Amino acid sequence: MPIPDGHFASLRYCDKCTSNGCTADACIVSPAGTGVPNTDFLNYVRVEDTDDCRSSSTLAYASTCQQDQYDRPAFGVTNFSPKKLSTSDSAFEHQVSTALHELLHTLDFSSRFFPLMRYEDVTPRTPRDEQGNPPIFNAGTCPNGKQIDYYVEPANTTINYSTERDHVVAKLVTPRVHAFVQDHAICSTLVSTELESQDGGCIGSHCEERLFEPEYMTPVDSYHARLLRRFRLVSSQRLDLRGHALWSKERMLLRNGEVCRSGDAESDSCGPFYGMTPSTECQRCSVDATSRAVCFFEH
């Protein structure tokens, strides 16, 4: 990703380094750039046919490349796959909602940031070592049974694991997430947001599809209009890395008001299509009554 010179701090370049700290070598010090004034977060966007684009059906992907002293994202990058982009009217909403979804990943909704969340007084929720790092594992077994390649472990006050529906699930359990889930489900016994178990790795980076289908951070883009109307989640009430979510007050229609059933391990997987299977026979009116919809879920 090409980055303008003006965005860099002063850097020291050395062609060779023959001494400690390269103190005896001829080095060049570049001037400091001006940066981007009055900016909390800068996202670089590119359209390039990368290996990730060519090896999958991915429309876009994103990541954060630098954090501030409190672990909040300062710089992010989003790449769109040029061969997957379309100028057709029918593709517009899907592409916009994908862009917003990826923006939220760069802002902080990602498994890499869960161990970096902080309390309101900015102290880390997950204990750090003398270098300021949370626990890091390069081998072993994840709580969900998958093999560890690289795993940064969040404290159990941030992520909790439990066995439901015959497999281990990870749940985000910070206080305002707790409050949001209870408000969404109208259920005093729900205390967490379940994360998607099919993302791969030890922890997913999406909300569980079967419980939060129209939310921005589920893995499947389905209710486009619903996603777009919840843009306030991004524009004014984004996730706060101190460990709680500042969610939009607009209610999600899917599951809303179903008391505790939406979080019950015994509840049907098909959302409002109880007893149906994911096929053409599962077509009904969408929960917001704006279109015909299909159930995505496997029982």
Image: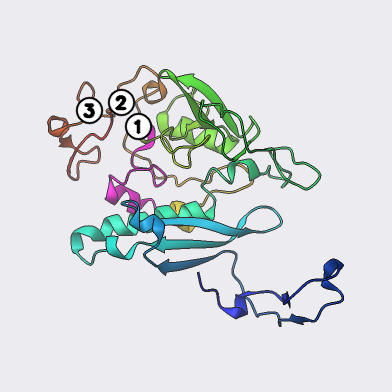
Q: Please state the horizontal and vertical placement of residue 212, each as a whole percent of the image.
A: 38, 36
The residue singled out by tag 3 in the image is 273
The stretch in magenta equals: 210-230
Q: Is residue 60 visible?
A: no
Q: Distance between the residues labelled 1 and 3?
A: 11 Å
Type of residue at label 3? Phe
Query: Which residue occupies 34% across, 57% down?
Result: 54
Q: Is label 3 in a helix, a strand or a loop?
A: loop
Q: Residues within 10 Å of mark 1 (few under 14, many from 20)?
A: many
Inspect the magenta stretch and tell me whether residue 212 lies in it. Answer: yes
**Label drawn at residue 269:** 2
Inspect the magenta stretch and tell me whether residue 175 lies in it. Answer: no
Q: Which of 251 and 54 is in front in this view?
A: 54
Q: Residues within 10 Å of mark 2 (few under 14, many from 20)?
A: many
Type of residue at label 2? Ser
Q: Is label 1 in a helix, a strand or a loop?
A: helix
